[in-house]
Each structure stands twice: as structure tokens, then as C-alpha cells.
Image: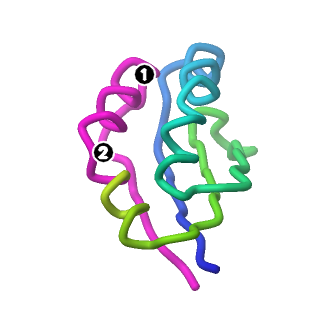
Amino acid sequence: MGAMIIRHSVGDYGAWRPVYDAHETARTAAGLTNGRVFRSTEDPSDILILHEVVDRRRAEEFGRSDDLREAMRRAGVVGQPEIRFAE
């Protein structure tokens, strides 16, 4: 099983987190499980998210989806997120 690693900045973590939590159904449908959220100790606006990936193709499609882009916009993600995969 692989992992999807997402890193991005947020304008306000308190506003971001409820939108992230509400998007769980979409992540699960894309085969992403066991999500873990970390905040940088130097910059609490710097977020790192790790998900286990059941199907990399579906996870990549999710990473490019308009649905994810819109959720990130609503959540206040700043700039372009960095999405990587690991095995």
C-alpha cells in the first residue's frame, strides 16, 4: 500500500479543519484511508497530510479533481498544494 502526501499552507487552520473533515466521504470514495494531519512547529499554517492509498490511479484523479480544488478554495488553502506519492 502506498501513501499520498499533501503539503500546503492555509490562511486560518481553524477555518480549514472543518472543511477538511467534511470532505472525508470524497477521500474515502477515492480510496484514501487513515488520514493524518500535521502542522509545522515553525509555521502552524504549513500543513502536511498523509493518507494511505488503496488505488494510486484513483488517488491521482482525486488530486486533480475540481471537487478537491473547490474544497481547498473554500477551506482557505493558500497557493498551489504539493501532492506526492510514496511506496
Q: Quadrant of the N terminus?
A: bottom right
Q: Is residue 83 left or right of residue 42?
A: left
Residue 76 percent coordinates (x, y) = 42, 21
Kindly identify the amino acid type of the residue bearing the numbered disc 2.
Answer: Gln
In this picture, is 17 found above or below 26?
A: above
Display coloring: rainbow
Residue 56: image tag = none
Camera-nearest residue between 44 and 18: 18
Q: Image point 39% across, 30% down: which residue?
A: 72
Q: Image point 43% across, 61% down: which residue?
A: 59
Q: Is residue 34 left or right of residue 87?
A: right
Q: Which residues are magenta?
A: 63-87
Q: Quadrant of residue 15?
A: top right
Residue 76: image tag = 1
Camera-nearest residue between 24 and 80: 24
Residue 21 percent coordinates (x, y) = 64, 28
Q: What residue occupies the far top of the structure in this picture?
A: 15
User: How many numbered tags mark residues here?
Assistant: 2
Residue 80: image tag = 2
Residue 33 percent coordinates (x, y) = 66, 55
Is residue 29 shown in magenta? no
Residue 34 percent coordinates (x, y) = 73, 55
Q: What residue occupies the far bottom of the structure in this picture?
A: 87
Q: Image point 61% across, 51% down: which residue?
A: 49
Q: Is residue 65 left or right of residue 5?
A: left
Q: Image point 47% across, 45% down: which residue?
A: 8
In this picture, is 62 found above or below 83?
A: above
Secondary-structure class at tag 1: loop
Kindly identify the amino acid type of the residue bearing the numbered disc 1.
Answer: Gly
Distance from label 2 to label 1 (Cα)?
A: 11 Å
